[in-house]
Amino acid sequence: MALAPSDEPTPGAFLAAATRRPLAPDVLEAARQAVADWFAVALGAAREPTTAAVRRAAASFAASGRAAVVLGSPSAEPVAALVNGTMAHVLDFDDTHPASGVHVTAPAWAAVFALATAEGRSGAEALAAFAAGYELAARLGAAGDLGAALLRRRFHPTGVLGRIAAAGAAAALLGLEPEAAEHALALAATMAGGLTGSFGTMAKPLHAGQAALDGVVAARLASVGFQGARRLLEPGGGLVAALVQDGSVRQEPLRLTAGQALLENEIKPYACGKGVHPFVAAGLLLAPGLAGRAVARIRVSVHPDAPRVEGIRHPRTAMEAKFSLSFCLASALLGSAMMPEDFTQRRLEAPQVRALMALVEVARDAGRPAPAAAHLQVTLADGSSLGAEVRLDREPAAGPMPWADLAAKFDRLVRPVLGERTDALFEALRQLDRPGRLARVAALVGAPSGP
């Protein structure tokens, strides 16, 4: 892994110093928000079939330990990381680092939460370790546009780079020396995987859970002297060369900072694949003007060089619908807020939704102004039309989400599960770096509330 300039720390040295390195106030705030969002989406997935299945499998392992499990009894660290990381990605409502295309928080915090609760570490240490793992994976995925290159080759960046995030965060929390931390990253790299062909199935959230598990295992192995091939992350090393074999990714020097990548984190407003978010936003803008009017055609035109946006054209399940432009756009045009409750089999099969889905077409048009733009046009039965321009590229980060907006998302997802515990949990997460707060959080989420 190249680093420049020469006085930049190696990844191992960067991770080794993480819990001793203070985070800037804005980075600390972004870290607290990312973790609060993580708990919201994980708890919001409590009643999902995927969650029930991974919890049943985890119970069959009969693994004992002290690592906190969301809505469960403490377990072994890898098992807790697997369950919690999977839960955090079930709704596809978890945050994203846009420049890398990685859902970093889901696996990175799952690994940290397992280790920190097992070892009795503080919230401040946990946040610092999380920020370091986030930084490493985000910069690696953004360098040379690696994350986008992985997607084009049908690898899920969260499955590949999420392991680097989890292993790096785990190594930082455990205080591994630089060489051992390098070996933890090497072990995570050789475990990397995850296919976009799994989108729309239970296997997609498993990518985050497995990445968290592997990150914990990699760090624990490295902590007792287990070694890997340390050149796997370097230019010409094994990871990128194996996954992007045409040499199109130019590995750039990594400039690692004290968590600045977290300032680029995006908390999702819609519970669906990030690639269809621009179309959802455009559809919601047009929805008021379409109310009660017959639609004849829905056309999305994009430049021939624009990334593929269609997703799953004919979704059969509610999970597949999260990655379907036709479903998400049709639902948005009908005014759906695109929250988790909007992704149901009943809504997918609703005649009004199906009728609009059948009208959605995507055309490649060289007349579009740029590969990063698309045009949405809805033609009505009376011949009139409504249109909106859609940005497909990665916009500059808008900054942290206002706490009031995050509180609304948190309450919507958590209150049906935790009831009266919801407010106490949110306040503890807002102050997670203060003494005793991490233990408080673990206690609040550690057992089911109600029947």
Image (cartoon, helix red, strand yellow):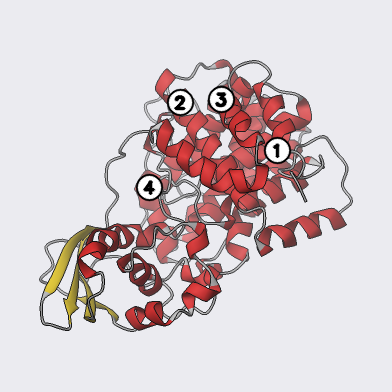
Furthest residue toward front = 292
Does the CB distance between marks 3 and 1 fall below 8 Å?
no
Q: Earlier in the sequence, mark 4 or mark 2?
A: 2
Viewer-nearest residue: 153 or 355: 355
> Label 4: which residue?
98
* Relative to 54, residue 229 above or below: above
> Label 3: which residue?
128
Q: Nearer the viewer, mark 2 or mark 1?
A: 1
Q: Earlier in the sequence, mark 3 or mark 2?
A: 2
* Relative to 235, residue 368 above or below: below
Q: Residue at x 37, y 26 (%)?
A: 5
* Relative to 326, residue 369 above or below: above
Q: Earlier in the sequence, mark 1 or mark 4?
A: 4
Snapshot quadrant of residue 325: bottom left
Q: CA distance from mark 1 to mark 4?
A: 29 Å
> Label 1: which residue?
445
> Label 2: which residue?
29
Does the CB distance between marks 3 and 2 fall below 8 Å?
no
Q: Earlier in the sequence, mark 3 or mark 4?
A: 4
Q: CA distance from mark 3 to mark 4?
A: 21 Å
Mark 1 closeness class: few <14, some 14–19, many ≥20 residues within 10 Å: many
Q: Which mark is residue 395?
A: none
* Residue 423 place in picture, x, y as percent: 59, 32
Q: What kind of residue is marked 2? A: Glu
425 relative position to 348: left or right: right
Q: What kind of residue is marked 4? A: Pro
Q: Nearer the viewer, mark 4 or mark 2?
A: 2
Q: What kind of residue is marked 1? A: Val
- The answer to whether residue 367 shows anywhere in this view is yes
Q: CA distance from mark 3 to mark 2?
A: 12 Å
